[in-house]
Amino acid sequence: MSVSVDGVAKLPGVEDEARFWAMVEAAWERLGPEPAALRRALRERDPAAGDVDPDALDEWLSPFVEQLCALAADLSSEELTALDRVVERKLYDLDRADVHAVTDGSDDGFLYARGHIVALGRDFYEAVRGNPALAVTDAECESLCYLFAHLHDKRFGDWPRTGSGISRESFNNPDGWRE
């Protein structure tokens, strides 16, 4: 378990979370109105109705990640670590049996499905936390899961030490898997 120097697990700060979600929105905004409308439709749909194509955003995920990387290109080690800590926490919080029941997937597949939920932005993330049926079966955004860690490694030669004491890997959140 990785913890901070004083032995206390680090949580993402409010400012770091706000910055992360703002960067996600800015990356999507750079792609124009079409993906914004698709994200809104996915968030507001009735999953049982089948009136929205859940795979409609697939073609937009790579350009979104490219834009997010561009926005993070000049960040410091501390800033990238803080953003990685936010992603780690968001993925951990979605590591739940009820979310897995909708998204399906193996260890890696479920991690990537949670990456998809986070990649679609705060509104979609919060909607799925409240109603897991809104998650998309077999959707994935693998590259978001370790995006800031990879950027940190590329720029600074090592992986960030988030000090959170948690794992973003699948089936590690004991609160999400109580039966």
Image (cartoon, rainbow, N blue to C red):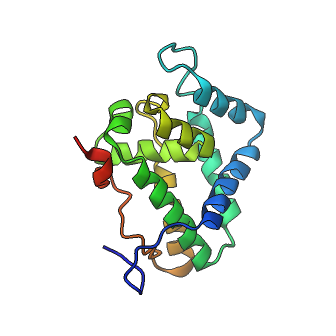
Of residues 47 and 37, which is closer to you in this image? Answer: 47
Residue 4 position in % (x across, y down): 42, 81
Q: Residue at x 51, y 13 (%)?
A: 49
Residue 19 position in % (x across, y down): 67, 61
Residue 31 position in % (x across, y down): 74, 42
- As drawn, the residue found furthest toward the left would be 179
Of residues 142 and 9, which is closer to you in this image? Answer: 9
Of residues 130 and 97, which is closer to you in this image? Answer: 130
The answer to which image quadrant residue 79 occupies is bottom right
- Above or below — where is 80 with respect to 119? below
Q: Quadrant of the N terminus?
A: bottom left
- Above or below — where is 18 with respect to 139? below
- Left or right: residue 87 compared with residue 2: right
The answer to which image quadrant residue 164 occupies is bottom left
Q: Residue at x 61, y 26 (%)?
A: 44
- Above or below — where is 11 with respect to 77? above
- Left or right: residue 57 compared with residue 109: right
- As drawn, the residue found furthest toward the bottom would be 5
Q: Residue at x 64, y 26 (%)?
A: 41
- Left or right: residue 98 compared with residue 87: left
Q: State whether residue 69 appears in this view.
A: no
Of residues 70 and 94, which is closer to you in this image? Answer: 94
Residue 27 position in % (x across, y down): 70, 51
Q: State whether residue 85 appears in this view.
A: yes
Q: Quadrant of the C terminus?
A: top left
